[in-house]
Structure formats: structure tokens, C-alpha cells
Image (tube, helix red, strand yellow):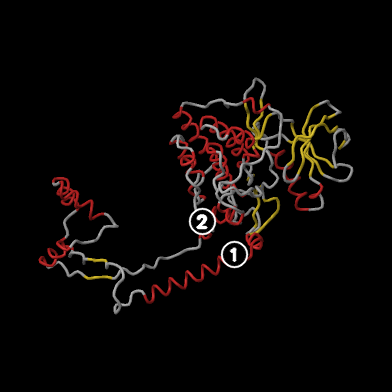
């Protein structure tokens, strides 16, 4: 275990403890060979015997060193401690993670958030052009650092579970494997489907969502099983319900970033940057952080606020987990859910089969459906619009009859129809309609 004062790698003198994540601890250090202050990330002892964890840890160094961008933390070196524990040497950053800043402020304005998201998108442009998909974008992996002159510069951290893929390929991990932070996963990532760079676009939208609302998109979900199911099957609560002052251009960016269908999102990060620039112009330009003092405040353990229902949940999937393995966490609940679904299905079949017997009195009003008029009797579209616009009464009648929830014909209309000989009305019991269903996971195939 690393301690203050240790010398690792033959030249890095360990200084103060800076923080701890799910897989590693971070320390300040001094490169005694050149006198440069650096940060050293050391893999936690519990993971040193896990070959997959060690591989992901070293993958961060390889990927980050391949991407040269001022928006991405610079990796300088790698090595091993005396006991074989691997470490990564990075540039020393001074500031605060974005999640810590959001929690301290409650939420931040769109004019503060958009420049941060734009900087992250700039990092994604470089990464995606090199074929690198981050797969774990979240506020905790964005560091707000103070640059010379006092400007705030966001930097993207932690490429540990990123993947390098060839252009046109979407196969980055084994089907059914879930890696990343559930609160910010795209639907296809939560379903364990093949991924491309558009999963990062969704996650960046989730980062913007939390920045301007102070809540993760699915913060009302009580546990991981419910969270993954919600991400796959339904959109999150609209951000403007939590932040009514959210400008319309920012709402549009959020909606497009977080589309459940990957092809409906931004095609790439450059398109997102273009819309961010237009939104900033529309809302009055970028604004500096209102609380820059928080970035230089003494670091302290910042706990994520509880979910909307008061529960807590592990924020990160640190290992490869499949949908099947997640299901094993709560077998009884899933069994009850399956039983309830089966009973509901049987009830629906019984209602469909026996609820429309013409020999039994209808328990609900029947729907009156009139036969369509012959083609020759139908008025033209031009004539209908002209007559509706010339007569207020006709216009109101047209509005009422165009309502799909309104009765299709009134008694007087039926009598008139019969007198014209245009058809005979028939009564159809109000039977439940059968609709085609589809597997929501088919969307991502």
C-alpha cells in the first residue's frame, strides 16, 4: 500500500492523498529527477489480482497517451510499485471535479454549463476521430481546473473502459456486457448492445442534464435493475420540469443528445458544438462560473445527493456485468414481476375472448361507426376548407368531428346520412383493440 513519503518507480516521491475512486487512489507526487509536480494514480489492492481490472487500468494510460488534446488529462508515465501494484503518472491538476461543483451549487445555469459541455465535446472530436469511444462520461470524470490567468478549463479523465475501434464498426465489447456508470448510460449501453461514438453523445447530454437540473436523468429509480430497465424503455423526466427557466435552445440540445435511437442523435461531436455555439449566441453568450472560489476550496468528501425517493445506489459498475447477472441480484422480485405479467396477459386474453359476446348486454356505451360515403359523394379538400372558413359553425363542427376521441357520428347526422342513401350505420361494441407489440431491445439491433 502506498503511503506519503514512499518512493515508487525509482523517482516519484509520494506526497499528499488527493482522492479515491472505484478502482484507484490518487496522490500528489514529485518527480525527483526533474523536480516536476505530478499526480500518481495507484490501483487499489483489491483489484491487483483481477487481470481484467489491471488491463482496464493500464488501458487508460495507453488510450490517453494516444489522444493529444488540451481538453484531456495528459498521461506522462506508467510503472509498478515494489509489490507489483501498477500506477499511472499524470499531470497535476488544481481544481475540482464537475460533480463536486454541481453538488456544491445545487445546479448551474445554462450559460455556465454550455461552455463546459462544449469543451468536453472538443475532447470527443479528437477521441472519436482516432476511433476512441470513452463509454464512461459523467460529471465525476470531468475536472474543472484553473489555468494560468484564472480561466476555468474542463479536462476529461478516466479512459479506463474506453475502446479503440475501426471506422464503421460498432462491436466494442461482448454482447450483454454492461460497463460504465448507470446514471449516464445510453439505452444501447444499458442493454449491453454494440456501441459506437453516439453513446458518448448521449452520456454528454446526461452530463448537461445534471448540470442544469442538479439531478441525474433517472434519479427517481430506486435500484440498478429499475434504472437499467427505465433507460432502455422510456425517456427521462423532461429537464425543464426541474428547471423551468431552461432556455429553449438548451432544451433542444438535450432532446437531441438523449434520443433513445442512436441515429436520431447528433451524427458527431462537431454538430453538437455547432448547436452549442448557436445556443450561446441566442441566450447571451457564455458566462464564467459564479462560484470559482469552490474550485480552490479544500478538497473534502463530496457525497452524491440521495435519489428522489430517498434511496441510495452504487453509482458505478466497476466490473463487467450482464443483464442476466443483474437479474440474479433480486430473484424474488423478478419472479413476482413475471407472475404478475403472466396474470395480466391471461386476463387480457380472457377479456378479448369473452368480453365481446354479442349475446350479453354491453356494460359500456357502444361506439357508432358510420360507413364511409361513396367516392363520388365525398367533397373535395378544397371545397371542405373553403366551406369551413366561410362558416363559423361549420368550422367549429369540423374541429369537433376531427377529434379522434369524439363520437364518429351524432344521431341527426346518422338520419341525414340514411336519407341521402350514403350507407347504413352499424353498431360495434366497444371491444378492446389488439395492437402489435415489439421488443424494445430490437430498436438497437
Q: Is 152 in front, or is 400?
A: 400
Give percent across and percent down for residue 254: 49, 41
Q: Quadrant of residue 11?
A: top right
The structure residue drawn at horizontal position 18% and vertical position 64%, both measured from the top left corner, is 373
Residue 57, above or below 441: above
Question: In the rendered view, does 208 fall on the left or right side of 364?
Answer: right
Quarter of the rendering occupied by the N terminus:
top right
Would you call the spot at circle 1 few (<14 residues within 10 Å), some (14-19), or many (20 or more)? some
Question: In the rendered view, does 248 fall on the left or right side of 131?
Answer: left
Q: Is 73 in front, or is 4?
A: 4
Q: Quadrant of residue 174?
A: bottom right
Report the residue marked by disc 2.
233
Report the residue marked by disc 1.
334
Would you call the spot at circle 2 few (<14 residues within 10 Å), some (14-19), or many (20 or more)? few
Give percent across and percent down for residue 162: 67, 46
Question: In the rendered view, does 302 fall on the left or right side of 308?
Answer: right
Give percent across and percent down for residue 423: 16, 68
- Report how far apart the C-alphas of labels 1 and 2 lie in the structure: 17 Å
Q: Identify the secondary structure beneath mark 1.
A: helix
Quarter of the rendering occupied by the C terminus:
bottom right
Residue 251, above or below 33: below
Amino acid at each position: 500500500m502506498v503511503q506519503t513519503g514512499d518512493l515508487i518507480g525509482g523517482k516519484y516521491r509520494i506526497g499528499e492523498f488527493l482522492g479515491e475512486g472505484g478502482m484507484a487512489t490518487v496522490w500528489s507526487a514529485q518527480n525527483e529527477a526533474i523536480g516536476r509536480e505530478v499526480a500518481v494514480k495507484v490501483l487499489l489492492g483489491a483489484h491487483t489480482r483481477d487481470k481484467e481490472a489491471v488491463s482496464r487500468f493500464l488501458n487508460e494510460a495507453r488510450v490517453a497517451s494516444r489522444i493529444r488534446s488540451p481538453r484531456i488529462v495528459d498521461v506522462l508515465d506508467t510503472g509498478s510499485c515494489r509489490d507489483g501494484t501498477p500506477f499511472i503518472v499524470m499531470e497535476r491538476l488544481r481544481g475540482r471535479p464537475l460533480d463536486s461543483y454541481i453538488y456544491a451549487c445545487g445546479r448551474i445555469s445554462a450559460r455556465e454549463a454550455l461552455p463546459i459541455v462544449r469543451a468536453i465535446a472538443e475532447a470527443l472530436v479528437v477521441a472519436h476521430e482516432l476511433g476512441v469511444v470513452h463509454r464512461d462520461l459523467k460529471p465525476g470524470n470531468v475536472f474543472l481546473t484553473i489555468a494560468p490567468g484564472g480561466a476555468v478549463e474542463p479536462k476529461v479523465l478516466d479512459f479506463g473502459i474506453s475502446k479503440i475501434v475501426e471506422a464503421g464498426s460498432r462491436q466494442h465489447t461482448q454482447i450483454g456486457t454492461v460497463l460504465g456508470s448507470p446514471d449516464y448510460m445510453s439505452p444501447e449501453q444499458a442493454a449491453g448492445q454494440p456501441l459506437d461514438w453516439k453513446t458518448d453523445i448521449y452520456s454528454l447530454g446526461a452530463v448537461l442534464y445534471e448540470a442544469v437540473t442538479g439531478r441525474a436523468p433517472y434519479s427517481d429509480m430506486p435500484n440498478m435493475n429499475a434504472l437499467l430497465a427505465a433507460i432502455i424503455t422510456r425517456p427521462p423526466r423532461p429537464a425543464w420540469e426541474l428547471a423551468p427557466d431552461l432556455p429553449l435552445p438548451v432544451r433542444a440540445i438535450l432532446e437531441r443528445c438523449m434520443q433513445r435511437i442512436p441515429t436520431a442523435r447528433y451524427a458527431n461531436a462537431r454538430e453538437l458544438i455547432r448547436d452549442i455555439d448557436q445556443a450561446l449566441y441566442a441566450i447571451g453568450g457564455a458566462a464564467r462560473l459564479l462560484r470559482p472560489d469552490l474550485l480552490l476550496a479544500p478538497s473534502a468528501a463530496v457525497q452524491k445527493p440521495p435519489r428522489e425517493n430517498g434511496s441510495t445506489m452504487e453509482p458505478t459498475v466497476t466490473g463487467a456485468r450482464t443483464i442476466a447477472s443483474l437479474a440474479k441480484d433480486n430473484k424474488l422480485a423478478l419472479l413476482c414481476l413475471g407472475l404478475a405479467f403472466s396474470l395480466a396477459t391471461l386476463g387480457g386474453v380472457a377479456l378479448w375472448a369473452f368480453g365481446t359476446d354479442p349475446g350479453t348486454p354491453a356494460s359500456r356505451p357502444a361506439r357508432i361507426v358510420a360507413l364511409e360515403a361513396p367516392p363520388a359523394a365525398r367533397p373535395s379538400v378544397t371545397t371542405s376548407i373553403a366551406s369551413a372558413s366561410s362558416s363559423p359553425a361549420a368550422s367549429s363542427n369540423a374541429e369537433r368531428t376531427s377529434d379522434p376521441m369524439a363520437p364518429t357520428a351524432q344521431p341527426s347526422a346518422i338520419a341525414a346520412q340514411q336519407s341521402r342513401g350514403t350507407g347504413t350505420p352499424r353498431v360495434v361494441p366497444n371491444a378492446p383493440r389488439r395492437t402489435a407489440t415489439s421488443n424494445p431491445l430490437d430498436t438497437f439491433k
